[in-house]
Amino acid sequence: MSQLAADLIGLTGSALFIAAFAYANVSKHLNKVLFNLANLVGAILLLISLSVNFNLAAVVLEAAWGTIATVGLVMAIRAKMRERQS
């Protein structure tokens, strides 16, 4: 992968993080599925970028961020499924 492609992928991931953070701060009713999905995709994109521009601290951070987002996404989807069954 080229340096430019890695940078564009990483910038897209960063933009998703920023958008999700902004959304969480202005939303009256946070859609946890959307919020966690944006964070998960952002983490994945940044990890892809970090495969070209390796930085151990950033990889650890993004892996943790992605793991937390995955758990949050699963919990949010389960909660929505329970709401629909009620």
Image (cartoon, rainbow, N blue to C red):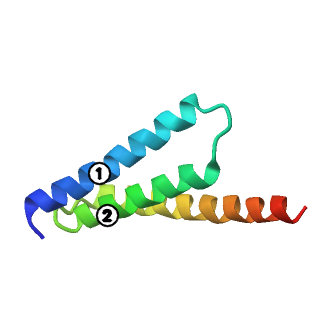
x then y, percent, for residue 29: 68, 37
Classify mark 2: residues with Cα within 10 Å, few (<14), some (14-19) or many (20+).
Answer: many
x then y, percent, for residue 41: 42, 60
Residue 77, quarter of the rendered image: bottom right
Give the SS element for disc 2.
helix
Using residue 67 as the reference point, say whether residue 15 is left or right of it: left
Residue 26, quarter of the rendered image: top right
* Number of the front mark, 1 or 2: 1
First of labels 1, 2 by sequence position: 1
| Residue under the point 55% across and 54% down | 36
**Amino acid found under the numbered disc labelled 2:** Leu
Examine the rendered structure and indicate whether residue 57 appears above or below residue 51.
above
Give the SS element for disc 1.
helix
Q: CA distance from mark 1 to mark 2?
A: 12 Å
Image quarter hosting the C terminus: bottom right
| Residue under the point 64% across and 41% down | 30
x then y, percent, for residue 48: 27, 66
- Which of 57 and 32 lies nearest the eye of the viewer? 32
**Amino acid found under the numbered disc labelled 1:** Thr
Examine the rendered structure and indicate whether residue 50 appears above or below residue 19.
below
Image quarter hosting the N terminus: bottom left
Using residue 62 as the reference point, say whether residue 85 is left or right of it: right
Residue position marked by numbered label 1 in the rendering: 12
Residue position marked by numbered label 2 in the rendering: 47
Using residue 76 as the reference point, say whether residue 83 is left or right of it: right
Classify mark 1: residues with Cα within 10 Å, few (<14), some (14-19) or many (20+).
Answer: some
| Residue under the point 76% across and 60% down | 79
